[in-house]
Image (tube, rainbow, N blue to C red):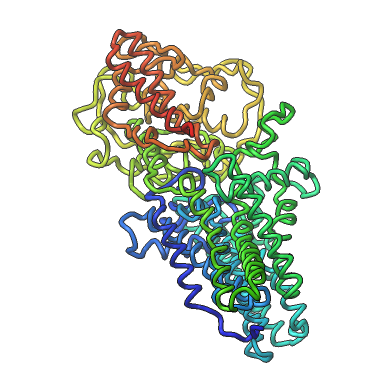
C-alpha cells in the first residue's frame, strides 16, 4: 500500500503539462477569433475593462504576458497565454489524479500512466482543447486556479499537522478570493476544499490566527475588483465597458458597494444582463440538463459523427466507475471528487439558468428564437469537462487494476501490471477524434473580416454595426493592429447602454493614415462620387472632422429614455427624411442613431454594416438614401440619383458598382472565408458573419450579370460558392 506522505511526482506533472502545451501550440490560433476573443485581446492590450464582471485579474495577467516576446503578433501571444494556463492546469490535475489514485492503483508506473491518460483526455476534450488554442474567454485562467487550489487542498490534507500546514489553507483562501476577480468560475473549487478541511482537521477553522489571516488575505485577493477597476475606469481606456468609476477600497469596505459606486456594483454583479432569480427558470430544468448532456456528448470524438456516441458512453462509464472506486477505497478523495462533480454539473446548471440551447430540440416549434441562447454555451462548462479527466484517470486506473487482477497467478507481479498499461491508449481517442474541429491553426477569418469591414468605409466614417461578431473584431483591428482607427464604431446593441453613448460622445477621432490603408483610400486614387456626405461633384479629399459625433452633452445622452414613441410624422434632416411608419416603439439605440444622422450629415460619412440587416430600412425608412458599397450601405444626404456607377441591384437595393468591385477584388481578403474546412464551420451561430461574403459576392454577381458583365459575374459567383462550400461539412 502506498503511503499518503509519498513525494508528489512533480517531474511527471511537468512533463504532462509540456505534452498538453505541445498539442495546444501545434493547433494554436494565429490571430483573433469571433465572439469575445477580440474584446479580451484588445482589453489586455490597452489595459481596458471588458464586459461585466470586468475580469481585472485576467486583464492584468494577460497584459503582462502580452509584453513577453514569445510570438510575433500580440494576438498570438495572448492565445499562448490561454494555452499556457490551460496546460499548467493539466499539470496540477495530474498531481491531483495521481494522489487520488494511490488507493486504487498501488503500482507506481500504472498509476502514473493512468493519471497521464485521464488528464490527456480532459485536456483534449473538444471544448477544453478549442478554448485553449485561442483566448476566447477568461475560463482557462479559472481552470488554472481551480486545478491549483484543488491540488493545494490535497497537499494540505497530506501535510503534517501544525502551523506550517495551516499556512497552506491561508494561501488557498487568498487564491479563491483572487480568482474571483478573474471570474467566479474559479471559486467552484471551494467544495473540494471544504471536504478536505472537514474530513482532515475541521478544528483548523477555530484557530484565531488562521481565521484572522484568512480575513486579511481575502481582502487583499479582492483588490483587483475594488482598486484596479475604478482607477483604470477613471482613466477612460479605449475599452471601458460599464465605466465602473468612483470607488476606492476603503469606501467599499466601510460604506458598501452601492453607496460608493453604483456603476462598479453593477459591473461586478452583472446587472447589464438583467437576469432574475434562479428560481425563475428561463427554460425547464430537464431541457437545461439536456443541454449540458448535448455539450458533454461533443467532447470525446466530435469529428467522428455517429461514433462519437460510442466514445461518450465509454468515457462516461470510465469516469463514473473511477468515482465509485475512489469512494470505496479513499473516502476523502471520493467525497471531494463527488463534491466537485456535483458543483460543476448539477449546481452550475441550476445557477446559470440558461435559456433553451441554441441547437437543442430543433424540431420544437414552440421554442422561439427569443427563448433560445444566442450561441452555444459549452464554454461555461469547460472546467467541468477538464475536471472530468481526473475521474477518467481513476476509471482507467480501475480498468488497469482489473486487467492486472485477471492475470494474477498467470503472470508475475511486474508483468501483469505491464500487461495492463495498454488500457492507457484509450486516452488517444479524444486526441484523434477532435483534432480537426478543435484546432484553430490557419484560421484568419475574424481578423480579415474586421479589416475588410473597416476598409469598406471612407476615412473618418461612422460605422453602425449590430452585435458582438461584427464589432469586437473591429475593436481588435483598431486597438491591436492599428487598422483604421479613424472609423467611429457605433454598436446597435451597446447604444442601449449609457456608457457606450458617453464613450462615443467623448471619442477623439485619430488621424487617417493612408499609408496603412488600402489603395482605394489613398490620395489621388478615389473615384468621382460621394465623399464625406457630399453628393455633388468629385471626391474632395479626407478632411479630419472636429468635435464629437454627438452634439448632445453627456448629461443629455444619459437622459435618453430606454423606450419612447416615434414622432407622429416624418422627421427631416436636410434632404433626408426619416419615416417611422413601420415602427411603433423607438428604443435608446434608435434615438442615438437619429442623433448620429442629424449631427453628422455632411460632416462625416455614415454607414450601416450589412450585418445590421434591415435596421435602417424598417426603423427609419432610409432605403431611398442607402447605397451598397461592399459590406456596407452608405447613407446619402439626398435621395439616390440612379446614374452610373449607382445601379439598382435585385435584393441589395442601390449599389455603387464601381466602388463595390474595387472593394471585392482589390481590398477584401475573401480567401479566409472560403478556405477549405473538412468539417465545415463548427460554430453555427457565428457562421452568418462569414456568410456575408457569400451574400455580397452572389449579389454582386447577379448585378454584374444584369449589367452584361458575365465574366466578372462568374468570378464573383465562384467566390460565393467557395464560401458556401467551406462552411458546410463535406460528405464523409
Nearer to me, 191 or 298: 298
On the image, the x and y values in percent for residue 447 come to 38, 42
Give the residue at the far front of this rendering.
Answer: 410
Task: Please tell me how many numbered marks the rendered image carries.
Answer: 0
Residue 587 visible in this rendered orientation of the protein: yes
Nearer to me, 261 or 287: 287
**In the rendered view, does 390 fall on the left or right side of 78?**
right
Nearer to me, 203 or 594: 203
Q: Is residue 172 above or below residue 557?
A: below
Residue 252 visible in this rendered orientation of the protein: no
Q: Quadrant of residue 626?
A: top left
Give the residue at the far bottom of this rendering.
Answer: 162
On the image, the x and y values in percent for residue 111 come to 58, 73
Q: Quadrant of residue 393?
A: bottom right
Give the residue at the far left of this rendering.
Answer: 524
On the image, the x and y values in percent for residue 424 come to 55, 63
Quadrant of the frame with the N terminus: bottom right
Name the residue rendered at 54%, 57% in the picture. 138
Name the residue rendered at 30%, 14% in the picture. 645
On the image, the x and y values in percent for residue 340 come to 70, 64
Name the residue rendered at 63%, 36% in the picture. 359
Q: Is residue 210 above or below residue 532?
A: below
Amino acid at each position: 500500500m502506498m503511503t499518503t506522505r509519498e513525494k508528489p511526482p512533480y517531474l511527471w506533472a511537468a512533463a504532462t503539462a509540456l505534452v498538453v502545451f505541445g498539442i495546444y501550440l501545434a493547433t494554436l490560433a494565429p490571430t483573433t477569433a469571433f465572439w469575445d476573443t477580440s474584446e479580451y485581446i484588445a482589453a489586455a492590450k490597452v489595459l481596458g475593462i471588458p464586459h461585466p464582471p470586468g475580469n481585472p485579474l485576467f486583464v492584468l495577467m494577460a497584459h503582462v504576458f502580452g509584453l513577453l516576446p514569445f510570438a510575433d503578433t500580440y494576438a498570438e501571444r495572448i492565445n499562448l497565454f490561454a494555452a499556457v494556463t490551460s496546460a499548467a492546469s493539466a499539470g496540477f490535475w495530474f498531481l491531483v489524479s495521481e494522489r487520488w489514485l494511490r488507493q486504487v492503483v498501488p503500482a507506481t508506473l500504472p498509476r502514473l500512466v493512468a493519471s497521464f491518460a485521464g488528464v490527456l483526455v480532459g485536456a483534449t476534450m473538444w471544448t477544453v482543447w478549442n478554448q485553449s488554442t485561442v483566448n476566447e474567454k477568461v475560463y482557462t485562467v479559472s481552470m488554472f486556479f481551480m486545478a491549483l487550489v484543488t491540488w493545494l487542498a490535497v497537499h494540505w490534507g497530506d501535510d503534517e499537522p501544525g502551523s506550517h500546514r495551516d499556512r497552506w489553507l491561508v494561501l488557498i483562501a487568498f487564491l479563491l478570493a483572487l480568482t474571483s476577480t478573474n471570474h467566479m468560475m474559479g471559486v467552484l473549487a471551494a467544495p473540494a476544499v471544504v471536504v478536505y478541511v472537514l474530513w482532515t482537521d475541521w478544528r483548523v477553522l477555530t484557530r484565531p490566527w488562521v481565521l484572522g489571516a484568512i480575513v486579511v488575505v481575502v481582502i487583499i485577493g479582492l483588490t483587483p475588483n475594488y482598486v484596479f477597476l475604478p482607477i483604470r475606469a477613471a482613466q477612460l481606456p479605449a475599452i471601458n465597458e460599464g465605466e465602473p468609476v468612483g470607488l476606492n477600497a476603503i469606501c467599499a469596505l466601510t460604506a458598501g458597494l452601492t453607496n460608493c459606486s453604483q456603476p462598479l456594483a453593477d459591473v461586478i454583479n452583472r446587472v447589464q444582463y438583467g437576469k432574475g432569480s434562479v428560481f425563475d427558470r428561463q427554460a425547464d430544468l430537464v431541457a437545461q440538463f439536456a443541454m449540458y448532456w448535448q455539450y458533454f456528448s461533443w467532447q470525446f470524438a466530435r469529428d467522428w459523427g455517429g461514433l462519437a456516441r460510442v466514445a461518450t458512453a465509454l468515457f462516461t462509464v470510465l469516469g463514473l466507475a473511477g468515482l465509485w472506486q475512489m469512494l470505496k477505497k479513499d473516502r476523502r478523495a471520493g467525497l471531494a471528487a463527488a463534491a466537485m462533480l456535483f458543483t460543476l454539473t448539477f449546481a452550475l446548471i441550476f445557477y446559470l439558468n440558461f435559456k433553451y440551447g441554441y441547437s437543442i430540440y430543433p424540431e420544437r416549434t414552440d421554442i422561439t428564437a427569443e427563448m433560445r441562447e444566442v450561441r452555444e454555451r459549452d464554454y461555461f462548462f469547460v472546467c467541468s469537462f477538464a475536471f472530468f479527466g481526473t475521474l477518467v484517470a481513476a476509471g482507467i486506473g480501475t480498468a488497469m487494476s482489473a486487467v492486472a487482477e485477471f492475470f494474477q497467478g498467470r503472470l508475475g507481479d511486474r508483468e501483469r501490471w505491464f500487461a495492463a498499461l495498454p488500457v492507457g491508449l484509450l486516452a488517444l481517442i479524444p486526441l484523434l477524434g477532435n483534432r480537426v474541429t478543435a484546432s484553430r491553426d490557419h484560421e484568419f477569418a475574424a481578423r480579415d473580416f474586421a479589416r475588410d469591414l473597416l476598409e469598406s468605409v471612407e476615412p473618418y466614417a461612422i460605422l453602425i454595426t449590430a452585435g458582438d461578431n461584427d464589432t469586437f473584431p473591429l475593436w481588435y483591428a483598431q486597438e491591436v493592429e492599428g487598422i483604421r482607427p479613424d472609423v467611429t464604431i457605433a454598436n446597435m446593441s451597446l447604444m442601449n447602454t449609457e456608457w457606450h453613448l458617453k464613450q462615443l460622445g467623448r471619442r477623439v477621432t485619430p488621424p487617417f493614415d493612408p499609408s496603412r490603408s488600402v489603395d482605394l483610400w489613398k490620395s489621388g486614387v478615389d473615384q468621382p462620387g460621394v465623399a464625406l456626405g457630399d453628393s455633388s461633384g468629385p471626391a474632395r479629399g479626407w478632411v479630419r472632422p472636429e468635435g464629437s459625433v454627438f452634439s448632445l452633452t453627456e448629461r443629455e445622452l444619459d437622459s435618453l429614455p430606454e423606450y419612447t414613441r416615434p414622432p407622429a410624422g416624418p422627421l427631416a434632416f436636410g434632404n433626408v427624411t426619416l419615416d417611422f411608419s413601420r415602427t411603433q416603439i423607438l428604443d435608446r439605440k434608435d434615438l442615438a442613431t437619429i442623433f448620429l444622422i442629424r449631427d453628422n450629415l455632411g460632416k462625416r460619412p455614415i454607414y450601416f454594416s450589412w450585418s445590421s440587416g434591415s435596421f435602417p430600412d424598417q426603423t427609419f425608412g432610409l432605403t431611398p438614401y442607402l447605397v451598397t458599397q461592399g459590406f456596407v450601405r452608405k447613407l446619402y444626404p439626398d435621395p439616390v440619383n440612379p446614374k452610373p456607377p449607382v445601379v439598382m441591384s435585385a435584393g441589395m437595393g442601390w449599389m455603387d458598382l464601381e466602388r463595390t468591385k474595387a472593394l471585392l477584388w482589390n481590398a477584401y481578403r475573401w480567401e479566409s472565408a472560403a478556405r477549405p474546412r473538412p468539417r465545415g464551420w463548427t460554430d453555427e451561430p457565428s457562421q452568418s458573419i462569414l456568410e456575408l461574403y457569400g451574400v455580397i459576392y452572389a449579389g454582386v454577381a447577379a448585378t454584374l450579370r444584369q449589367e452584361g458583365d458575365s465574366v466578372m459575374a462568374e468570378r464573383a459567383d465562384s467566390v460565393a460558392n467557395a464560401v458556401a462550400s467551406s462552411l458546410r461539412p463535406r460528405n464523409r
